[in-house]
Amino acid sequence: MRRIIEIYNNTTFELSKLDIQKDPSSPVIRFCVRDKLVGIFAIETGKIVLDNGLTKFEYMLAEKEIIHNRCKFLQSWDNYSKFLEKI
């Protein structure tokens, strides 16, 4: 199960149920291009947790969007975590 947070043309940022269940205290966001996972980033720091073939442009785009939307992404992580605890 996943929750899509942002969509830009062919790219998406999404939260994953698996990531939340694995470590709810370490918020990460998945960055996909054309539905292919290309990277996972720590929301709080913007650091790459998983590089699955990120290009320099994709990295710069993801970094910019994470910085710009950090509060929104963290709030979504908290809300999604609380929702998953209830089910």
Image (cartoon, rainbow, N blue to C red):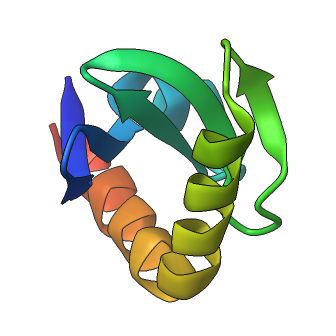
Which residue: 84% across, 51% down?
A: 47
Question: In the drawing, does residue 76 fall left or right of residue 43?
Answer: left
Quarter of the rendering occupied by the C terminus: top left
Q: Quarter of the image holding residue 24?
A: top right
Q: Farthest residue to the front: give it.
A: 57
Question: In the drawing, does residue 59 fall left or right of residue 11?
Answer: right
In the depicted view, which residue is nearer to us: 64 or 82? 64
Which residue: 56% across, 79% down?
A: 70
Q: Quarter of the image holding residue 67?
A: bottom right
Quarter of the rendering occupied by the N terminus: top left
Q: Where is residue 68 in the image (x, y as percent from the top left)?
A: 54, 85
Q: Position of residue 58 (x, y in %)?
A: 59, 42
In the depicted view, which residue is nearer to us: 50 or 11? 11
Q: Where is residue 64 in the image (x, y as percent from the top left)?
A: 62, 72
In the depicted view, which residue is nearer to us: 57 or 27? 57
Above or below, comparing residue 48 to residue 65 in the picture: above
Numbered-mark total:
0
Q: Where is residue 62 in the image (x, y as percent from the top left)?
A: 58, 55
Q: Quarter of the image holding residue 44?
A: bottom right
Which residue: 32% across, 59% down?
A: 82
